[in-house]
């Protein structure tokens, strides 16, 4: 549920703004409305935050957990600067090594020679040129200019590395393919280059070793970052205390259940306080609190990064319920579900022993995999093996009408998909109807119209998508659609400006409303993706099984290869199915359901102004204190 909030307006003496900010931080309950985010001090803190985050980003990950030591601010800054300098040096050394390696590869064909000897010959007037050309060009060159003093040093499959004594002759217009181009002489010999590469590599390894040794400081840097964040938040809240002469004012929000305690605390500080319900134009933070059985969906919501607005619906319960169904139908394989269930039990047991509690995400995986086992068992899908479904123990679990391998089951599963879609969408409008009725809003009757329309469209979907003979449109379906759309036209724009004015407003949006009705029809059809994606997973599993059986009939090596195909193939299929769950299972909740519910997911989380650390926002070491 979305926790009711209260709007709080605080009045303090302007000369006590810093002390008031400190006390607000200690109370840790008010979500302040920050209006001022720029100042010299804040800019300094943000630069420090950027520096420490850069250091944490480039610092190698490590498992070292030394005793917790609080770094002084200057120590932390010096450490961040040192890390960044080492990373820059490591990058330079890597670039230098790559440059030297390219140069080594360029001159390696001529071998290791004394550069001083070449320079001495050049000073005596004898030019030595390094030539590299293709084998074909070399043959043409020797044929065209046999008297040319050019000598092969190294021959590969495609290239000739040669040395020319004297100046390179002018290109022969009749033989353009044998034009010679001189390679620049190296600055170092091959041996010198290789020694330089080794030296640079040692320096690079030393820098990396220093960085790895600094992983022990990661915890301290994280703590320093937290202190900076505390300081930034403190500065923003203090700056947001708007001064009006001798009085400073700040507004914020807090859970209604904590209002009395907050009022009592504020009275002790002799502050002025106005508590009120949030207005319709107020941007109120959202605090969601659910009981443990429903809370297990929260890790997925956090992963998606979506929060309902304060005045929107919390769909955690319905998301959990329908997502479990979608997950089971999309994965569709009891064998896959069993593997995931075993994994959730293993990791849950391990975490219970280590931490005394099981992470909600693991419990969620257990629920989803359990639902998958149930659906896969009643449809007879175990790793895509029909023979496995025919085993005595498994065969008794299969519902004949849903048997994956029976030709008639496809239409039955498709109908189930449309039933689920109709219930899902109708539920969205029902929830909106209940909320609007509580608000005594006449627009609630438009939601009844949408419910009637959706239920009528359901029969039309069965007729058009599955079979017009098996599912003829009943006589009451079209009147349900018509009556429903009439209710929508009459009541959807009743916003308290007058009944007939609302009807006229609806007539002005005639085309969009008709398109919304068509959209409802397509939304119901979109639930067939549960059948289609599940069928695709079954066919992929079956293909890998047939491929593996084919190899297993050709001896020991074939059997090993077949086992490898089964393991790799089904692993890939599980990964693809999991991706399909994210794409399709989440979409049906976040798009189809939420659109009909009216959720725009435009909310932002309730984050009370509180200390992240028990110390002050910029803590000194014991020595400096």
Image (cartoon, rainbow, N blue to C red):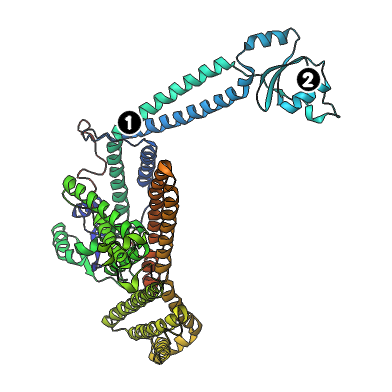
For the C terminus, the image quarter is top left
- Secondary element type, mark 1: helix
* Vertical position of residue 485 compared to residue 405: above or below: below
Question: Residue 338 appears at what percent x and percent y?
Answer: 28, 56
Image spot of residue 186 (x, y percent): 63, 19
Residue at image mark 1: 214
Q: Are marks 2 and 1 in contact (CB under 8 Å)?
A: no
In the picture as drawn, the residue positioned furthest to the right comes out as 174
Q: Which residue is mark 2?
A: 168
Residue name at image x 19 percent, y 45 percent: 614
Number of labelled discs?
2
Q: Position of residue 366 (x, y in %)?
A: 25, 58
Residues at marks 2 and 1, CA–CA distance in whole angstroms = 56 Å
Q: Nearer the viewer, residue 102 or 49?
A: 102
The one of 382 and 358 positioned closer to us in this rendering: 382
Q: Is residue 240 visible?
A: yes
* Mark 1 closeness class: few <14, some 14–19, many ≥20 residues within 10 Å: some
Toward which corner of the image does residue 244 lie, by quadrant? bottom left
Graded by Cα atoms within 10 Å as few (under 14), some (14 to 19) or many (20 or more), the crowding at tag 2 reads some
Along the polypeptide, which appears first: circle 2 or circle 1? 2
The image quadrant where one finds the N terminus is bottom left
Point out residue 109 in the picture as x, y percentages from the top left corner.
63, 20
Q: Is residue 240 left or right of residue 13?
A: right
Query: Which one is in front in this view, the residue at disc 2 or the one at disc 1?
Result: 2
Left or right: where 213 falls relative to 477 = left
Q: Give the image quarter of residue 150.
A: top right
- Tell me: 463 left or right of 132: left
């Amino acid at each position: 549920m979305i926790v009711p909030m209260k709007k709080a307006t605080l009045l303090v003496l302007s000369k006590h703004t810093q002390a008031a900010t400190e006390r607000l931080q200690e109370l840790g309950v008010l979500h302040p409305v920050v209006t001022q985010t720029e100042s010299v001090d804040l800019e300094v803190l943000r630069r420090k935050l950027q520096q420490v985050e850069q250091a944490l980003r480039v610092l190698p990950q490590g498992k070292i957990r030394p005793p917790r030591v609080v770094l002084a601010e200057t120590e932390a800054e010096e450490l961040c600067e040192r890390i960044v300098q080492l990373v820059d040096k490591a990058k330079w050394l890597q670039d230098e090594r790559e440059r030297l390696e390219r140069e080594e590869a360029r001159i390696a064909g001529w071998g290791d020679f004394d550069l001083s000897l070449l320079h001495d010959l050049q000073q005596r007037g004898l030019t030595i040129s390094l030539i590299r050309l293709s084998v074909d060009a070399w043959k043409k060159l020797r044929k065209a200019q046999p008297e040319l003093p050019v000598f092969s040093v190294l021959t590969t499959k495609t290239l000739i590395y040669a040395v020319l004594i004297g100046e390179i002759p002018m290109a022969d217009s009749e033989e353009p393919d044998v034009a010679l181009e001189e390679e620049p002489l190296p600055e170092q010999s091959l041996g010198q280059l290789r020694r330089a590469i080794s030296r640079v590599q040692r320096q690079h390894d030393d820098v990396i070793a220093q960085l790895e040794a600094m992983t022990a400081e990661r915890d301290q840097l994280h703590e320093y970052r937290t202190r900076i964040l505390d300081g930034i938040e403190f500065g923003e809240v203090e700056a947001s205390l708007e001064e009006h002469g001798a009085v400073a004012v700040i507004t914020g929000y807090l859970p209604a259940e904590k209002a009395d305690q907050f009022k009592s605390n504020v009275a002790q500080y002799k502050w002025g306080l106005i508590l009120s319900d949030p207005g319709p134009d107020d941007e109120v933070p959202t605090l969601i609190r659910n009981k443990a059985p429903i809370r297990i969906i929260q890790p997925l919501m956090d992963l998606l990064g979506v929060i309902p607005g304060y005045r929107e619906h919390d769909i955690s319960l319905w998301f959990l319920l329908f997502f479990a169904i979608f997950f089971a139908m999309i994965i569709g394989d009891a064998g896959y579900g069993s593997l995931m269930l075993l994994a959730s039990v293993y990791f849950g047991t391990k975490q219970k022993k280590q931490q005394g509690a099981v992470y909600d995400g693991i419990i969620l995986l257990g629920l989803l995999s359990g639902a998958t086992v149930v659906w896969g068992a009643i449809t007879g899908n175990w790793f895509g093996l029909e023979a496995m479904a025919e085993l005595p123990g498994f065969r008794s679990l299969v519902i004949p009408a849903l048997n994956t391998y029976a030709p008639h089951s496809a239409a039955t599963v498709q109908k189930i998909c449309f039933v689920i879609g109709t219930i899902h969408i109708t539920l969205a409008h029902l929830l909106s109807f209940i909320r609007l009725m509580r608000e005594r809003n006449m627009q609630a009757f438009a939601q009844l119209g949408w419910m009637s329309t959706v239920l009528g469209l359901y029969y039309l979907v069965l007729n058009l998508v599955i079979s017009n003979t098996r599912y003829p449109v009943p006589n009451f379906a079209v009147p349900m659609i018509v009556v429903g759309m009439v209710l929508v036209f009459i009541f959807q724009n009743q916003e308290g400006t007058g009944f007939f004015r609302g009807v006229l407003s609806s007539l002005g949006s005639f085309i969009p409303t008709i398109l919304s009705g068509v959209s409802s029809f397509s939304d119901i059809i979109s639930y067939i993706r549960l059948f289609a994606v599940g069928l695709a997973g079954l066919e992929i599993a079956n293909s890998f099984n047939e491929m593996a059986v084919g190899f297993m009939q050709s001896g020991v090596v074939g059997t090993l290869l077949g086992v490898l195909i089964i393991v790799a193939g089904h692993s890939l299929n599980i990964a693809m199915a999991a991706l399909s769950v994210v794409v399709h299972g989440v979409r049906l909740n976040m798009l189809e359901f939420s659109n009909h519910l009216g959720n725009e997911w435009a909310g932002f989380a309730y984050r009370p102004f509180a200390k992240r650390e028990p110390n002050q926002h910029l803590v000194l070491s014991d020595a400096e204190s």
